[in-house]
Structure formats: structure tokens, C-alpha cells
Image (cartoon, rainbow, N blue to C red):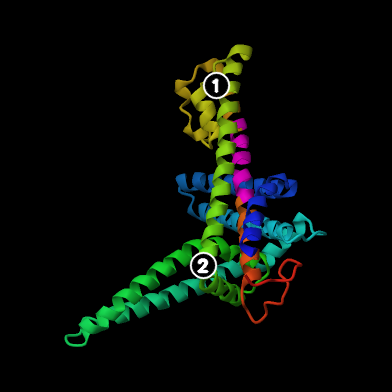
Amino acid sequence: MHAWAALARVLSSVEAVRDGQAWYLLLTVFASGGILVAAAESAFAGSRWWEASIEAGLAFFVVFYGSNAAGIWTMQRARGETGHDVFDAVCASLLRGHRLILMVLMLAAVAAAGGALLWALLWVSKLRYVGPPIYALVVPVAVLSVGLAALAGVVVVVPLAAPAVWAGESPLQGVRVLWEIARQRLVMGALLVAAVSLVTGLTGALASFVVMVGGSVVAQLSVWITGVHVPAGLLMAGLFGHGLRSVDSTQIPPEALHHTFAALAGGGVVFALAVVVPGLVYLRGVCAVYLSLRESLLLPEAAREVDGSTPRAS
């Protein structure tokens, strides 16, 4: 029953597209980060190295902590918490967003230790007399261990490390929870993460359909009504994220130049909106997966309430 409830929670993540404050937060993050990246690229092209470095660092800061703020806000909604606003989520991100970096470093250290152990076993296997028997044992153990570790990395560590931080776990607690999820709920986690990917992909496909159909119709209507021929290819390029730098102004009729630049600017807004839609669904989906798996773990503190309900073991 728990598996079906978890799947229903994942499928309900599409409701995240109705969260207006999450829209505002993610759009602000994308816009601010994009402006800073563009400024860094311009400074780099002009050989202004210090300015480029500062702007690139600011871009990382804004995108990293802004994305964590959006994740914390989404986690609060997934847990049914009310009484918070976006400013609270931003403050929480600034206070604990660095935990994600610490978790990544700890997990990297664990992976490095596992790699060192595998290297040592393979090195011992080259010894003249004891090597072949040891190698016969190492091969199946190593193959299964590496394969399971890779699967855990893809379906547990990558999608669920950030939600652990958003849920308020410390770096050590987060690593422990991810380990227990990989040990107890690896298959279920893989299926739920696959469901999140499917829902996110379908949402992105719907957003792309809206953009493509709407862009084609508007491009044709613009020619009929305004009499200015804005190249449909350039309009569609703007709708899919290509900026003004991608335009060769010499290839555009002079009378259509200003309208083309305006179309690219407006298309950039549409592109940002189309990216936010699957982004919101993905954030809500991974939060739902983390909460569902966290509730089902057989941990000593399993009685701790994660989202206001009594945890159950499946």
C-alpha cells in the first residue's frame, strides 16, 4: 500500500505548476543567474579576468542558493507546512544550503574509499600464487558492488541529496538516510525516480508543444497583421533560448530589425516560463520521493515525523 501511496504522491507533483510564489522564485533565480553569466562572458571576452571571476562567482552563488531556496519552499509545500513565505525559504537556504556541498564531499570521500579498496583487491589479485583464487572472488563481488553503487548514485544520491538538505537533515544525517534508502529501498527508489523523470518529461513535452504551436501561429499572424516579416526561424530560436548574440543582423531586412530583436527578447521570457514548468514538477517530485522513502525506512528514530504523519514501514 505504501508503494501506491508514494506513486500517487509523485504523480500529484504536477500540482506544483500552480504554485505562484515558486514561479516567482525560480524565474528570479534564472533571470539573475542568466544576467550574471552573460556579464561574466562579456568580461571574459574583454580579458577583464577579475571582473569575470567575480561575476561568475556571483552567478554560482545566486543559482546555488536560489535553487536551494526554491527546493526548501517546495519541500515545505510537499510536507503540508503553511505559515512560511519566500523570504523564509531564502533565509533558510542561506543558513543551510552549504550542507549540500558538505554532503557531496562526504559522499565523494566514501566513493574514493570504495575505489581505493577495489584497487587494492585488484592489486592483490596480480600476485603469483594467491592472485587467481582471490581474483575469482573479487570479480563477482566487484561487479555487483560497482553496479549497485552506480545505480544508487543515479537513483538515490543525485536526485535525493538536495531534498535531504531541504528537509532539514544535517550532512551526516543526510548521508546516513541516503545509505539506508540505498540499502533498504533501492528498487522502490529507482521506480519512483523513474516516475518523476517520466512526469517531468511529459510536462516538458507539453510545454514545448505549447511553445512550438503558439510560436508558429504568432509568427504567421505577425506577417499578416503588422506587415513586418520577422523570420519564423529566429522567432522560434528566441522561444528556445537563443539570445541576441545568435542573430546575424546583416541577414535581416532593415525594416524588420527592431521587431526581430523584440521577438527574441519576448521569446526569452517564454523560454524561461517553459523551463520553469518542468523544473517545478521535478522539484516537487524529488521532494515527494524523499519524503515517501524517508517515512518507510526502518531507522531507530523511525518514529520521528517527517511530514506531520506517522511513518510506516512497508
Q: Quadrant of residue 73?
A: bottom right
| Element carrying mark 2 | helix
Mark 2 Cα within 10 Å, few/some/many (few <14, many 20+)? Answer: many
Query: Disc 2 and disc 1: Cα gap in Å?
Result: 55 Å
Q: Is residue 197 above or below residue 114?
A: above
Q: Which badge, 2 or 1, is on the more N-terminal residue? A: 2
Instruction: Residue 141: give x, y in percent of width and height.
Output: 35, 76
Label ID, residue 257: 1
Is residue 287 among the parts visible in the rendering?
A: no
At a point 51% along the width and 61% down the height, the residue shown is: 190
Which amino acid is tagged 2?
Answer: Leu
Range of magenta residues: 266-281
| Element carrying mark 1 | helix
Q: Residue 167 versus residue 65: which sits nearer the camera? A: 167
Which amino acid is tagged 1?
Answer: Leu
Label ID, residue 243: none
Q: Is residue 308 above or below residue 121?
A: above
Magenta stretch encompasses residue 270: yes
Q: Which residue is mark 2?
A: 186
Instruction: Residue 256: give x, y in percent of width and height.
Output: 55, 18
Magenta span main SS: helix
Q: Is residue 47 above or below residue 162?
A: above
Rendered-image quadrant of the C terminus: bottom right
Instruction: Residue 4: give x, y in percent of width and height.
Output: 63, 59
